[in-house]
Amino acid sequence: MTEEKPLDFAREITGRLGGETITRCYQCGTCASACPVTKTTERYNPRQVIRLALLGQRNDVLKGDAIWLCASCYNCQERCPQKVEVADVIYALRNMAIRGGNIPAIYTEFAAALMNEGRLAPMSKFLEKKRAEYGLPPLKPANTEALKKILAATGFDKIMFRKEGAT
Amino acid sequence: MTGYALFLGCTIPARQPHYELAARKALTKLGIELVDMEGATCCAPPPIQSIDLETSLALAAYNICLAEEADLNILTLCTGCFESLTIANRILKGKRELREKINKILSNVGKEFKGTKEVRHYLQVLMDDVGVNRLKQNVVKPLNGLKVAAFPGCHLLRPSELLRLDDPERPRIFDMLIETVGAKSIPYKNKLRCCGGLLRGYADDVALAIARDKIANAYNAGADCISTLCPFCFLTLDLGQMLIKTAYKEEYNMPIIHYAELLSLSLGVAPKELALDFHKMKVDKVLEKIG
Ligand code: SF4
Ligand code: SF4
Ligand code: SF4
């Protein structure tokens, strides 16, 4: 990894789903001024994340906290004059971070709910009862068998539930 | 009668039956037939996209395949589901290589994404299938005098290049539908700015600060309620006010009410037929106002 040139990291990002447009950025800052999170906290600025990524600062980007602070509101992406798909770039960076073992706890919870129930908000006995009281039909269960096969085919289970280690 | 495959998603049926109940009542009254989907899974929204975009596309495509097989277009209530499914549908229709890759994954479960169906949010169905005029004719209890801060949420409008539902900078549809049921859609500061909901669970303090801003802006503009389309926006703004009370010692008591509920009320559904006890911020003021 010490041998890596700055551009290697950028190339890796553009090769990923969502990351294709990152190199179009010319650092104007329109994204940051459109960002509700940047307005609220100093912990996050999309222009800076992109800058660090283009400078090849792999660890700062993928091990840091910033990429997890995007609210995926797409306001930046709507306004970027260079048509950088900023919110999608952040998804690509998160995908890479997770593969490298930087997985915020809440995402492990989401993944577990998905794998076990096929849904992020599992049904409860209380809600089942309430639904019946209001005359709502019982919720049809997700096809978890099909889901598990899809998750196995994309490698989702391995991405999420493996030991921290090599990237 | 127009029929749709109803894609409920994860959150609405398991956490917000008041949304589902109101939507089913209103849409059925308006002659929209809803067919419950068999075996649908999570739509693969932003939290799953954050883990792996390819998995998300595959899951969205799987769900669209179910509708293709039933020969129905999909109707969504949740704007998050609308976004995930619409993006996947449009990307996969347009990009052959990616479609082939996803179809290879789906072949493990005997499915193939063909790209023959549309995904529609229920606002589009109200606008296009029912139409403003017929909707107006069906309003038996206009919500006269009710000042509504409309909050369309992010994922109804953006990314507009793929969602194509309304103008992302000057949307009109949601406001028009609020006015069609007799209420007034009032202007307020930063109306189109995100609620911060997706940061809950990772950065609760940041999420709450963003939500507080939205509630305060609606409050300062004199709104009687904030109207939502997205279950995450609802949660962020409704439950959020209890968290704000603890964290900031501020009480707004701002009712958050799904548009489907306002619509149902205007179509003559009695409040006691709606699951209004699922609101943390009581909606009594809204009910009083519309009499
Ligand atoms: S708006 Fe676009 S070009 Fe400007 S800094 Fe942001 S990503 Fe780069
Ligand atoms: S999508 Fe993320 S980076 Fe872009 S404006 Fe929204 S919160 Fe900021
Ligand atoms: S406003 Fe919040 S909950 Fe609604 S779509 Fe945007 S991020 Fe999601």
Image (cartoon, rainbow, N blue to C red):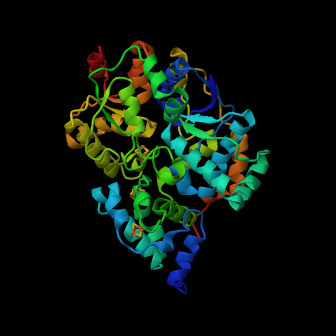
Q: Quadrant of the N terminus of chain B?
A: top right
Of B6 and A138, nearer the camera is B6
The x and y percentages for residue A100 are 55, 67
- Occupied quadrant, residue B6: top right
**Which residue is rendered at x = 35% and y = 28% of the image?**
B179
Residue B153 in view in this figure: yes
**Which residue is rendered at x = 23% and y = 41% of the image?**
B216
Q: Quadrant of the C terminus of chain B?
A: top left
Examine the rendered structure and indicate whether residue B104 appears above or below residue B277.
below
Examine the rendered structure and indicate whether residue B247 appears above or below residue B252.
below
The x and y percentages for residue B144 are 29, 20
The x and y percentages for residue A59 are 47, 74
Residue B44 in view in this figure: no
Q: Is residue B97 left or right of residue A93?
A: right
Of B138 and B60, nearer the camera is B138
Q: Is residue B11 left or right of residue B251?
A: right
Residue lying at the far bottom of the rendered structure: A3
Q: How many marks?
A: 0
The x and y percentages for residue A155 are 68, 57
- Occupied quadrant, residue B54: bottom right
Residue lying at the far front of the rendered structure: B133
**Which residue is rendered at x = 55% and y = 71% of the image?**
A13
Examine the rendered structure and indicate whether residue B62 appears above or below residue B4.
below
Examine the rendered structure and indicate whether residue A61 appears above or below residue A5.
above
- Occupied quadrant, residue B110: top right
Q: Is residue B202 left or right of residue A116?
A: left
Name the quarter showing ligand 3.
top left
Of B248 and B64, nearer the camera is B64
